[in-house]
């Protein structure tokens, strides 16, 4: 067997680290937009910090709807996702193999939350995202949604492989 594959993976792949850091910043900003509405919306005192949402809420009206409980729940779940992921990054820094487990959990939350968001939108007949323009639907909803599925999924496979390798090594040590 490849000796490198049989040694415990105590670190996260660089791709996973980069994705987690960037996605956590975006997720935190997104959650702040939702939780700070209406101050974060056009005309609000924090509008300057969230100016791209002026365009985005025209294409995903769920974010403009102050009575939509799903985006509020999503913003709260984001905090747990980030906390678990930051735990994984910390474990990576100190060289603990459990970093892969924590990162895998966080990436799984991102993936699952995105599937839920997409499924809910489809079940509602694309009421919040389909406004008759295919290009806008692709640019502002489908392409970003696919990004939030593909990158976490790749990270899940990578950290999942590390978990299996680490588990196999532990079993070998016990035998």
Image (tube, helix red, strand yellow):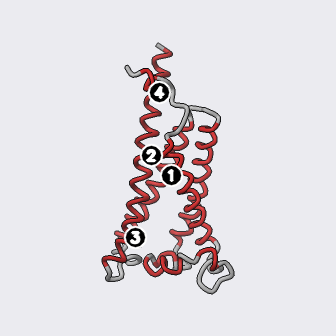
Local secondary structure at mark 1: helix
* Residue holding disc 1: 19
Residue extending farthest to the right is 45
Foreground label between 3 and 1: 1
Q: Residue at x 49, y 46 (%)?
A: 16
Is mark 1 in CB contact (under 8 Å) with mark 2? yes
Decide which of tag 3 and tag 4 comes sooner along the chain.
Answer: 3
Is 111 situated above or below 142? above
2 or 4: tag closer to the N-terminus: 2
> Mark 4 = which residue?
167
**Mark 1 or 4, closer to the camera:** 1
Q: Earlier in the sequence, mark 3 or mark 1?
A: 1
x and y percent of residue 57 in the render? 49, 78
* Along the viewing direction, whichever of 19 and 80 lies nearer the viewer: 19
Which residue is at a point 41% across and 72% down the rendered structure image?
A: 140
| Label 2 vs 3, first from the N-terminus | 3
Disc 2 and disc 3: Cα gap in Å? 22 Å
Q: Earlier in the sequence, mark 1 or mark 4?
A: 1
Residue 43, image x and y in percent? 63, 86
Q: Residue at x 51, y 43 (%)?
A: 14
Using a 10 Å C-alpha cutoff, classify the residue at mark 4 as few (fewer than 14 neighbours), some (14 to 19) or many (20 or more).
some
- Which tag is nearer the camera, tag 1 or tag 2? 1
Q: Which numbered disc flags the more N-terminal residue, 1 or 2?
A: 1
Disc number for residue 141: 3
Residue 173: image tag: none
Name which quarter of the figure residue 6 lies in: top left
User: Quadrant location of residue 27?
Assistant: bottom right
Find the distance from the CA under tag 3 to the CA under tag 1: 19 Å
The percent coordinates of residue 167 (x first, y second) are 47, 27
User: Which label number is shown at residue 155?
Assistant: 2
Kind of element beneath mark 3: helix
């Amino acid at each position: 067997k490849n000796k490198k594959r049989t040694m415990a993976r105590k670190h996260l792949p660089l791709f996973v680290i980069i994705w987690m850091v960037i996605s956590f910043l975006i997720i935190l900003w997104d959650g702040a937009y939702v939780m700070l509405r209406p101050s974060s919306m056009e005309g609000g005192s924090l509008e300057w910090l969230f100016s791209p949402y002026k365009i985005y809420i025209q294409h995903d009206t769920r974010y403009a709807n102050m009575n939509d409980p799903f985006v509020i729940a999503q913003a709260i779940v984001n905090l747990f996702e980030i906390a678990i992921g930051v735990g994984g990054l910390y474990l990576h820094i100190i060289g603990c193999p459990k970093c892969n487990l924590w990162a895998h959990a966080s990436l799984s939350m991102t993936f699952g939350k995105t599937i839920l968001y997409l499924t809910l939108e489809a079940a509602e007949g694309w009421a919040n995202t389909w406004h008759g323009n295919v290009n806008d639907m692709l640019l502002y909803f489908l392409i970003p949604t696919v990004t939030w599925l593909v990158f976490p999924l790749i990270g899940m496979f990578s950290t999942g492989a590390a978990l299996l390798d680490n588990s196999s090594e532990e079993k070998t040590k016990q035998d």
